[in-house]
Image (cartoon, rainbow, N blue to C red):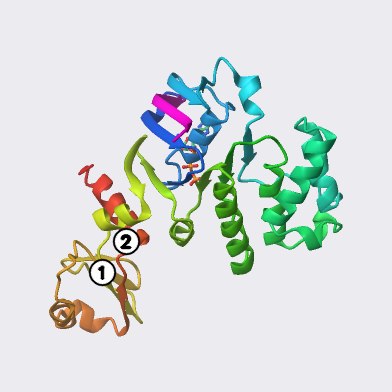
Amino acid sequence: MTLSITLKNIRKSFNRRTILNGVNLQVHQGEIIGLLGPNGAGKSTLIKLMTGLLEPDSGEITILGQPLHKNKRELRKYLGIAPQSLAIYPQLTVKQNLTHFGAINGLSVEQLRTKYTKVLTTFNLTNLQNQRAINLSGGQKRRLHSAIALMSQAKIIFLDEPTVGADVDSRNQIIQSVKALSHQGITVIYTTHYLQEMEALNAQIIFLNHGVIQATGSVKSIVQQYAHPSLELYFGKSISDNVAGWQRSDDHLHLINSSPHQNYAEVLQAALSNPIVQKSQLINVKILRADLESAYHTLLEKSVNHEI
Ligand SMILES: Nc1ncnc2c1ncn2[C@@H]1O[C@H](COP(=O)(O)OP(=O)(O)OP(=O)(O)O)[C@@H](O)[C@H]1O
């Protein structure tokens, strides 16, 4: 498989604070990479480095087989970027926005025509092409914003939280669009805090934390390695004290260190006989699935405990 992106030992600090501390990564053509990590983990910084908007302090970035720092101008035309904040012209129509950015990105008249039709279909914007951007819904604006990144010769597209503010329908349409891009051979680097989107995309997960990649693999393998079912107890009153074996939030307890073979009936019985629990008015019991969210929490817990 052709390599789209290679990162070798990438380091980046801001004001002497290390943000990325030796990131290594290989991304293949047509892959959907789900970049995950808590707030401030360095996901946007990594995207800025891969798109040449920032320079690494050290390390090597190769895009489509060529070193980025030596061929920035040439390579940039193959990179489509939809940053977190919306960048669309509100007074222009969908069509005018797309063709304007296509022209800026150097597409010929012929390329513009072909790309335009394809992008409209991919992002389900055909019926909206003559509407002014200002009149679009939040989710439709997001779709236009992502579509603009493709009005170029992009072979790799970076979507930084593309579904923020999108309703369920628009979110699903963005997911379908991303899958379509991957089928067209376009590599997608996708960040989100909505883990169900990663599952829907069946992305290759990169979990970034404390400046390094702490886990990587398909959704299935990450779930197999790190996820396990768990229990949560919800209360009508604040929980007054810690309960051994449970993580306490204001109104709920989350079972920690649960294992796949745990007997939940026994665990629940033990919790219910605890005086702190008895005082707090239990109102709901939730069994959590062994899914990507569970794996994500395990990874966070492990990194807090310095196990990885
Ligand atoms: N130009 C900059 N100057 C100084 N510090 C910066 C700069 N850019 C980012 N940072 C810091 O680097 C850290 C990583 O930021 P970054 O935006 O990459 O995180 P993120 O993983 O994308 O977070 P989020 O999920 O909140 O979007 C943060 O602590 C941020 O404050």
303, 295: nearer the viewer: 295
Image quarter in which the C terminus is found: top left
From the top left corner, tell me how far across and down residue 158 is, in percent: 57, 41
Total marks drawn?
2
Q: Which of marks 2 and 1 precedes in the sequence? A: 1
238, 99: nearer the viewer: 99
Which region shows up in magenta?
A: 1-14
Q: In this view, does 61 lie to the left or right of 128?
A: left
Decide: is 253 above or below 305.
Answer: below
Question: What label sits on residue 230 in the rendered view?
Answer: 1
Question: What amino acid is labelled 1 in the image?
Answer: Ser
Point 38% across, 30% down: residue? 23
Proximity of marks 1 and 2: CB atoms separated by less than 8 Å: yes
Distance from Cα at disc 1 to Cα at disc 2:
8 Å
**Residue at numbered disc 2:** 294
Q: Is 8 colored magenta in this rendering?
A: yes
302, 205: nearer the viewer: 205
Instruction: Identify the element where label 1 is drawn.
Output: strand
Question: What label sits on residue 167 in the rendered view?
Answer: none
Question: What amino acid is labelled 2 in the image?
Answer: Ser
Point 18% across, 82% down: residue? 272
Instruction: Identify the element where label 2 is drawn.
Output: helix
Image quarter in which the N terminus is found: top left
From the top left corner, tell me how far across and down residue 45 is, in percent: 50, 34
Q: Is residue 178 visible?
A: yes
